[in-house]
Image: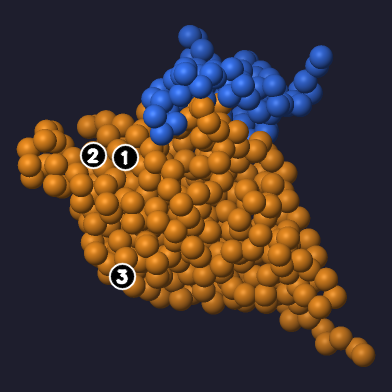
Chain colours: A orange, B blue
Amino acid sequence: MDKFGYAQSQKFDTYASRLMPREEYFTSGHRSCQGCGEALAVRWVCKAIGKDAIIAHATGCMEIVSSGWPQTAWMHPWLHVAFENASAVASGIESALKVLQRKGKLKGPMPKVVAMGGDGGTTDIGLQSLSGALERGHNFTYFCWDNEAYMNTGIQRSSSTPYGAMTTTSPPGKMSIGQHTQKKNMTAIAVAHGIPYVATASPSYLFDLFFKVRKAIETPGPAYVHVLSVCPTGWRSATDLSVRLGRLAVETGVFPLFEVVNGKYRLTVEVPKLRPVNDYLKPQGRFRHLREKERDFIQKHTMAQYQLLLDKCGASYPEFPVITEPEEEKE
Amino acid sequence: MSSKPMDQVTWQEIEAGAILTEPGSARGYNTGDWRSQHPVWTKSRCIRCGVCWTVCPEGGISEEPGGYFDMNTYCKGCGICAKECVTGCISMVPEEE
């Protein structure tokens, strides 16, 4: 894996699919649903991490599907830990490795310490231990698989569920439009800890993901990578659209791909012309109940958030989609 | 611990703490019998770029000796490869008995 080192990793922009590493560290035979974008993300993140790593994984979809006892899909030393303490366990592993190295019991380079969790295990339940680990400055990398609800327990809402989405605990109806709060901005929370590396990634942009994971792993100190992973089961979309939906999320500005190195924002995937957000909402059954009014609201909110991000990056504005003001309803 | 399914494991084989000592033993579980459709490659239009291999969440596509790609026994039939194929040489065919 030396040839994928930090210094050379700038070259991933011109990388080709065939030349990517062939070793599988998240093996076939795991029990994820058909077309799982999260499994795709884990497969590529594990490839990018390389073989010298210890993983602490919070409860979540990827823990459930990969470790149906007595089989495991992981090639790394891997621990399943509870929802709330994945980062605490990772910081413990990192401290223990440091002690072993100081006492001369660990020869050679230090293994990378990685913590992973779903969006429930990151934005809701595991937030306190993640915040603590980021604040203490342990040398580890945290990956959040964001599929925007608690999918493996039956699609309950989490604080990462976007506005207007249907879940089993935020059902749409006469008095409700589904989820009525906006998605928690987890990357901004991670940036606020003043850690050296924060990034958002999507398996639909594989080389971008690969490059960011290499960078996060090589960064001394804590790093946080937020990965959008499409869930056909919970998003009520077709199984073959997983990769395309991830791309649409970037092209519509719902989930912009950027990285923050020492507090400095940089947009990694620039979109010359934003697509209307309806292109992203339409293939998903969880937004099926939304009316024109709410779709316009989501469009305006997305554009406002995207402009705020561009201001932080210092990038120029792309061409925004035109919103036609709806005619006033006659009562 | 071998890669046997759960109903064939006896208690004598279980390690202390029920830890798993064999990495990647999930390969013993054939997920291919879930599928209701499978991809078929038209070799004359395939440019061997490897995009289908990269976008497969299962690792269900592997390279063959000629440099072409084909599905293996883990394919769950989601259809992402057919959707993402650059030349459109992959088509999904219903599974037959």
Look at the picture and state if A208 lies above or below A285. above
Q: Which mark is residue A111?
A: 2
Q: Residue at x 34, y 34 (%)?
A: A77
Residue that lies at the very extreme toward the bottom in this rendered image: A331
* Quadrant position of the C terminus of chain A in the picture: bottom right
Is there CB contact under 8 Å for labels 3 and 2? Answer: no
Measured in 3D between alpha carbons, the distance from the residue under mark 3 to the one under mark 2, in whole angstroms, is: 24 Å
Q: Which residue is mark 3?
A: A193
According to the image, label 1 marks what residue?
Answer: A54
Residue B84, horizontal then vertical, whole percent: 61, 36
Q: Are marks 1 and 2 in contact (CB under 8 Å)?
A: yes
Q: Is residue A277 left or right of residue A292?
A: left
Please say whether residue A248 is visible from this viewpoint.
no
| Side of A94 relative to B57 (left or right) | left
Query: Helix, strand or loop at disc 3?
Result: loop
Rendered position, A201 above or below A180: above
Rendered location of residue A240, percent (x, y): 68, 39
> Nearest the camera: B31 or A94?
A94
Q: CA distance from mark 1 to mark 2?
A: 7 Å
Amino acid type, callout 2: Pro
Is the residue at mark 1 from the same chain as the one at mark 2?
yes
Marks 1/3: CA–CA distance: 24 Å
Q: Residue at x 27, y 52 (%)?
A: A92
Image point (80%, 16%), residue name? B96
Q: Earlier in the sequence, mark 1 or mark 2?
A: 1
